[in-house]
Image (cartoon, helix red, strand yellow):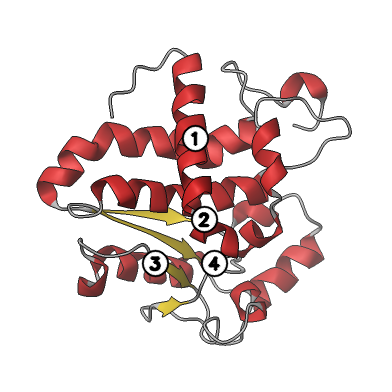
Amino acid sequence: NQEPDGQLSEDKVDVLYQTNYLSHFLLTLLLLPLLRRARGRVINISSVVHRSAGLDDFEITCKIRQPYASLYGLSKLAQIVSSYALHARYGEEVAFHCVNPGGVASDIWRGFAGWQQKLFSSVLISPKTAASTVVAACTAKEAAAPCRPRYWNGYLGADRSVLLEFWSPFPAREALVESQPSQDHQDPKLAEQLWEQSLAELRAAGVEVNV
């Protein structure tokens, strides 16, 4: 919602940011006891659009923007950065990874004209094909803990060119094509800042978090 009265949730956090990132972060924290016992893994569905996020946007996750500016890219960057923050604390027992599925002919295009939807369906990969990469990340032995966070892609060639993270004529399917996310994810200071900010936003919403 781009209108000022619809940008923030009841918790006073940007709706899109809370939906895409903060809610997933909370769920991960709540499941940590089970994940640690099972030596499990967490797979976040990120996006190549994380590369467009500005770090200054972390300062406006609880602010109304006029004119409106979407925090979609920031929410996807936060997923990646938080994987490193979680790995630093629990990486010996739980694996934290991200998958960028690339362009997918999903219901996300429902607001577009009919001819555009048909075009996307003809050139983008299907949700089933995109999901096969996610399933591979969930089951591959190389992704089991202890394991450094990985960023995998839905298209072959994405490990050679960032452009192929958006689209390629060759879907990765069960192949795990790793590339390096934006350089911001490599900053330990940013990971710690996001960790503290995320906990503060949850506690401000009345959520008891024990970590």
Given contact means CB atoms under 8 Å apart, are the residues at marks 4 and 2 in contact? no
Judging by the rendered image, the residue that carries numbered circle 1 is: 22
Please identify, in this view, whether the residue under mark 3 or under mark 2 is nearer the observer. Answer: 2
Q: Position of residue 27 (x, y in %)?
A: 35, 35
Give amino acid for label 4: Pro
Please identify, in this view, whether the residue under mark 4 or under mark 2 is nearer the observer. Answer: 2
CA–CA distance in space, label 4 to label 2: 12 Å
Q: Which mark is residue 150?
A: 3
| Badge 3 element | loop
Depicted 15 relative to depicted 188: above or below: above
| Badge 2 element | loop
Judging by the rendered image, the residue that carries numbered circle 2 is: 187
Judging by the rendered image, the residue that carries numbered circle 4 is: 181
CA–CA distance in space, label 3 to label 1: 20 Å
Give amino acid for label 3: Arg
| Label 3 neighbour load within 10 Å: few <14, some 14-19, many 20+ | many
| Label 2 neighbour load within 10 Å: few <14, some 14-19, many 20+ | few
CA–CA distance in space, label 3 to label 4: 9 Å
Residue drawn 60% across and 37% down? 17
Mark nearer the N terminus (4 vs 2): 4
Mark nearer the N terminus (1 vs 2): 1
Mark nearer the N terminus (3 vs 4): 3
Residue 12 appears left or right of 187: right
Question: Where on the picture, by quarter, is residue 162?
Answer: bottom right
Residue drawn 54% across and 36% down? 19
Given contact means CB atoms under 8 Å apart, are the residues at marks 3 and 4 in contact? no
CA–CA distance in space, label 3 to label 2: 15 Å
CA–CA distance in space, label 1 to label 2: 20 Å
Q: Position of residue 71 (x, y in %)?
A: 69, 42
Give amino acid for label 2: Asp
Please identify the quadrant where the C terminus is shown.
top left
